[in-house]
Image (cartoon, grey):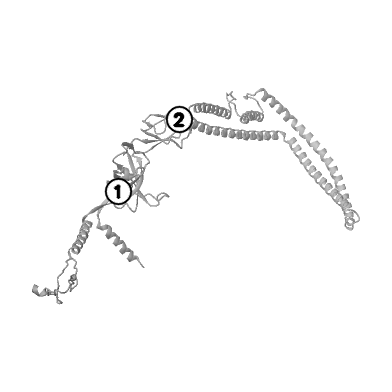
Amino acid sequence: MTLTGGHYEANGHKPADVPQAALEPEAAPAAQPKRPPKAEKFEHPLMMQQSPFWSRTILWSLMAAVTAALTWACTAQIEEAIPAQGKLEPQGTVKRIQSPVNGVVKEVFVKEGQQVEPGDLLLQIDPTTAQAQLASLQQIRLALTQENQFYQAQMQGNAIAAVAVEIPSQFLTLTQNRAELVAENQLFRTQLKGSTAGMALSPLQAERLQFSQAESETRATAARLEADQAERQLAQTQAKLASARNTLALNQSILREVDPLAQAGAISRIQYLKQQQEVEMNQSEVNQLIEEAARLRLSITEANTKVENVWATDRKDLSTRMAQNDQSVAEIDSQLSKAIVENNKRMAEIDSQISQAQQTLTYGDLRATTAGTVFELKATSPGFVVNTTEPVLEIVPNEALVAKISITNQDIGFVEAGMAVDVRIDSFPFSEFGDIEGKLVWIGSDALPPTQIQPLYTFPAKIEIDQQSLRVKGREIQLQSGMSVSVNIKVRERRAITIFTSQFTKMGDRLQQVR
């Protein structure tokens, strides 16, 4: 600011010069005492005026800064990155080692975290149980084979051969019955022929034949005697029937007479019921005698028929018994055939068990199929029971780790294989240990459906990392499979001003959607 101390006229002009003498005061009289001089008074106030330099400087500085910022925003390029999460996994597949057979672990040769090479012995399964099982199964199969051979020999009519195995009692009885039925049919055929020429009969069969012939000769006499006896029984029955009918008629007459008395109360109800019961018993006896008389008449008729046609009856009986025996033999053969079929089924199952036992002995030593690190070892000590459905351990291959991540379907648009990636290990803070450079090498061709952990559709992807370790406090720490990672995929470069213009675009879209 500039300060002005002169006097000015009312019109703003400086007054004209006045002689100095005119301005000096007149000399005071000598007689008067001197007084101190009075302070000079200005006739006009002072005026302060601000300089325009600083305001112009600030204004031009602001304009230059805004211009520079706009120029930078329009020309500068910034990186756009897509975040994703995942974990480190071996580039090769983790090998799950399963036992090909069931068994009990005899000895464990590895421990958790141990390095193994292809062919290294991991576990050994105890062969004792498998050996005992194999011997038992082979013995059972041999017994079943011999049992089937015995049944087949019996069905073919061969003599009972001595077998080293024990045949079940029910089937042994069946085979004996079958042999007896076959021999009996042979005897019946001899009787039908009436001659033993050309027949090789055993002493027992010859004796039975003689007895049968003697029986046939006396059959007629026996039939006549049977008829006579039946006639005598019929006569007795008829006499009993007549007596029973008389008794029934008498009791019925008594019942009719006491019925009015019972209704009038002259006799007790019990007496009436007893009389009624007596009538019913007499009626039942009459009915039984009638049936017995009919049966006896039928017996007499049958006996007379036997007398008249005894030989025809014998032949018919023999034929019938032969047919029955043949049917019984067929039923026995059917049961023996079923036994053979069941034994064959059991042998098929036993063959499978024998094969499994042999496989157990063959694959009793469990060996590594690839080089790597033992992981998730379950059989840590002898006595562990292994099966064919659950893995005993896992081998993590000694290969470079890759980051397997999931990219949401909202971020997949500009992502493509070959893009640079910043990989941050969640176990090591980024601010202290930094990140690892990597490259996106593979992207899934289709999205995976949502899960409880990841509620969005995601695309699987793989990232190759440039280093397999981090330097922590002067020492190298190897990365491990399963570590979680957070990655930033550098998808493209964009002008800085687009960040602001996109916000205005979104605001405009929202205004258009307002109802």
Disc 1 crowd rating (10 Å Cα; few below 14, some 14-19, many 20+) is many
Label 2 is placed on what type of residue?
Gln
Between 183 and 13, the one nearer to me in the picture: 13
The residue shown at (85%, 45%) is 244
Label 1 is placed on what type of residue?
Ile
**Mark 1 in CB contact with mark 2 (< 8 angstroms):** no
**Residue 73, percent from left and from top:** 23, 57
The residue shown at (88%, 51%) is 271
Which residue in the structure is indicated by mark 1? Answer: 489
Q: Earlier in the sequence, mark 1 or mark 2?
A: 2
Q: CA distance from mark 1 to mark 2?
A: 51 Å
In the picture, the quarter occupied by the C terminus is: bottom left
Between 159 and 396, the one nearer to me in the picture: 396
**Residue 486, percent from left and from top:** 34, 46
**Above or below — where is 465 with respect to 37?**
above
Which residue in the structure is indicated by mark 2? Answer: 359
**Residue 250, percent from left and from top:** 88, 49
